[in-house]
Amino acid sequence: MSDPSPAVDLHAADAPPTPADACLPAPSTGEADATIRYVDSCDLPTPWATFRLHGFIDTASGKEHVALTLGELDDGEPVLARVHSECLTGDAFFSQRCDCGAQLEEALRRIATEGRGIVLYLRQEGRGIGLINKIRAYHLQDLGADTVQANEDLGFAADQRHYGLCEPMLAHFGVGALRLMTNNPAKVVALQKLGVLIPERISILVGHNPSNQRYLSTKREKLGHVIGLPAE
Ligand SMILES: Nc1nc2c(ncn2[C@@H]2O[C@H](COP(=O)(O)OP(=O)(O)OP(=O)(O)O)[C@@H](O)[C@H]2O)c(=O)[nH]1
Ligand SMILES: [Zn+2]
């Protein structure tokens, strides 16, 4: 996977945005020109802690991304982190087809317990194919395909995600090293290729249920995830 390192174009954290900053997505200029622009932050009370929610715009695609932070992050110590790709069905609708919602909740809970950490929430729904195509992929899975076959039957790669925006987003917070909560070694490698240090990968094995058992075994067998399933 090629992850172009986007140029950094970040506004000062304390500068209030103009309406144009906040609302106008830039026309796409292609990935090589991708820039991430910090826009604004606010408090976000959750059941576990009051996080800071930070908004960014990828000016190349117009996509809006967010980071949730807690505590002091720029002291040079590796930061407990989750790099989470959008899953509307799992994160918002309690879908049991995947483990995303449970992982997001667990990540926030663990960060709250430590009092320090970051979640990068990347708007690359459906492993990068988008929400509507994910619904089409789910339909194919209803008919018997697994999560990888379904993507491929639709003409997509099994995983179309890019992590290039993570490095400048992390740099914005003065973070260079992560203790990354993931079961996905490919995510670790992709971030390391961007220059992000990952001294520790932390398993996040939550949200297993009968409806996602096949999905999780396919992730392990075809996508290389480190997942021990309960039946084994
Ligand atoms: N195309 C497709 N995308 C899916 C399917 N199930 C979940 N997803 C997407 O897969 C992505 C999961 O992202 P992450 O939660 O970052 O997880 P991961 O890379 O699988 O690895 P972990 O860090 O271990 O969770 C999200 O974008 C989901 O929308 C599926 O069956 N098909
Ligand atoms: Zn999901």
Image (spheres, rainbow, N blue to C red):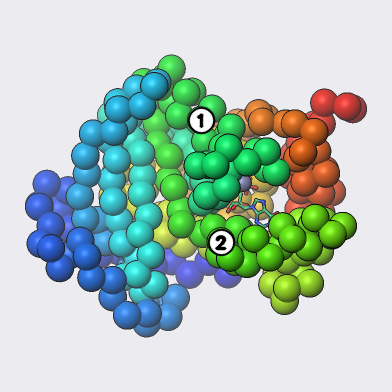
In percent of the image, x 88 and y 27: which residue is there?
231
Nearer to us in this view, 170 or 76: 170
* Res. 7 in view: no
State how far apart marks 2 and 1 are (Cα). 21 Å
Where on the picture, by quarter, is residue 46?
Answer: top left
As displayed, is residue 171 above or below residue 2? above
C-beta proximity under 8 Å, tags 2 and 1: no
**Residue 105: mark:** 1
Mark closest to the chain's N terminus, 2 or 1:
1
Badge 1 element:
helix
In percent of the image, x 79 and y 57: which residue is there?
141
Given this view, does label 2 or label 1 mark the residue nearer the observer?
Answer: 2
- Residue 83 lies, in percent from the top left, at 50, 45
In percent of the image, x 25 and y 56: which residue is there?
38
**Residue that badge 2 annotates:** 131
Nearer to us in this view, 96 or 125: 96
In percent of the image, x 23 and y 70: which residue is there?
24
Picture quarter with the C terminus: top right
Q: Which amino acid type is shown beneath numbered disc 2?
A: Leu
Where on the picture, by quarter, is residue 137?
Answer: bottom right
Question: For disc 1, does the CB lie below 8 Å from ligand 1?
Answer: no
Badge 2 element:
helix
